[in-house]
Amino acid sequence: MSFLEDAAPASPGAAASRMAWAKVNLTLHCTGQRADGYHLLDSLVVRAGVGDALHVVPAEDLSLTVSGTRAEGVPTDARNLVLQAAEMLDAGAGRGAALHLEKHLPAAAGIGGGSADAAAALDLLSAHWGVPLPADTARLGADVPVCLTRGPQRMQGVGEVLTPLSALPPCQMVLVNPGVDVPTPAVFSALSDKNQPPMPDVIPTFAGFSDLIDFLREQRNDLAAPAIAREPVIASCLEALSDAALARMSGSGATCFGLYANAAQAKAAAHRISAAALHWWVAAGPILAA
Ligand SMILES: C[C@@](CO)(OP(=O)(O)O)[C@H](O)COP(=O)(O)OP(=O)(O)OC[C@H]1O[C@@H](n2ccc(N)nc2=O)[C@H](O)[C@@H]1O
Ligand SMILES: Nc1ncnc2c1ncn2[C@@H]1O[C@H](COP(=O)(O)OP(=O)(O)O)[C@@H](O)[C@H]1O
């Protein structure tokens, strides 16, 4: 399955649409913990070309409907981050909009599905209503600020400190999710050492795919061990991706990614894994350049 084929096109009656691309943590170092319990991170974040699609048409009242391959279980009420983003932007003014979310990303999966939807809603409604983006979008979720950006980012602080990085060399990715929800707070709590080394001060510009892989091999996802201890099937996902140049978990899991030098290899791996594990969510495509 190709990422871009997987992404739904804008629906014909929609006034405007945005894609909510999956967020992938190529690295995730936990470097400390704040007094309020939130963890300090150092993470290289990219967007994969698979995502949800959010559409808006003008309306008197604010409403949300959800469809798509992963719509089951996604709330359509005030718990949905799309509506929380709309309320944040509207700030009590009572503006209306009929929103429709096409859900393709698994939720609670370490690829920021909810956060990407919130960022898409902020961007879409900011243009639709002609109002500026609020400053403190991290209130909606630590991953929302990075989901409002494009291109590779170094993400630090608790998610709000963002440094854009040079474009990465062309790189193909396979994402694999085994269908288990991994609650982010539980994985952070189970992390025994919360003061681990950050990435190097300077993230190099990578001349080619193999330089990127060499760099990533030296980095870590500190949440992988506690996530695997909770859900051992994550180790099976990594094993399924063992033909990749590098395979790691994203975020707090359970989604794992494999990096491949070319699209044919990535597609072949995605087909092989889909055929062997019929209930896993599998997608293949490029890391988005910008
Ligand atoms: C771990 C990361 C890495 O990108 O990704 P995911 O696994 O969620 O995709 C993010 O930091 C998650 O971002 P997000 O899911 O938006 O977090 P929030 O809703 O703000 O927080 C959920 C919970 O995660 C924990 N949390 C989150 C961020 C952070 N820097 N430290 C934390 O300890 C807290 O227990 C918090 O209550
Ligand atoms: N638009 C949305 N899509 C998916 N989940 C959502 C959405 N809005 C709220 N949620 C809730 O947010 C939780 C975290 O979802 P998500 O951001 O996909 O996970 P993660 O923190 O692992 O990246 C889910 O358990 C879900 O109930």
Image: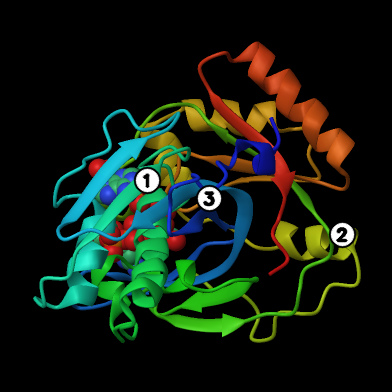
Closer to the observer: label 3 or label 1?
Answer: 1
Q: Residue 35: horizontal and vertical position, in percent?
A: 19, 78
**Vertical order, 237 against 171 (above or below):** above
Q: Earlier in the sequence, mark 3 or mark 1?
A: 1
Residue at disc 1, secondary structure: strand
Q: Quadrant of residue 135?
A: bottom left
Q: Quadrant of the C terminus?
A: bottom right
Report the residue marked by disc 1.
101
Q: Position of residue 67 (x, y in %)?
A: 37, 34
Q: Residues within 10 Å of mark 2 (few under 14, many from 20)?
A: some
C-alpha span from label 2 to label 1: 34 Å
Mark 3 secondary-structure assignment: loop
Q: Which residue is mark 2?
A: 209
Residue 209 horizontal side relative to residue 122, left or right: right
Foreground tag (2 vs 1): 1
Disc 1 within 8 angstroms of ligand 2 (CB): yes
Whole-percent x, y for residue 207 in the image: 90, 72
Type of the residue with mark 1: Leu
Report the residue at 65% width, 19% height from top. 274
Q: Which circle marks residue 250 in the picture?
A: 3
Whether the residues at callouts 2 and 1 have beta carbons within 8 Å, the answer is: no
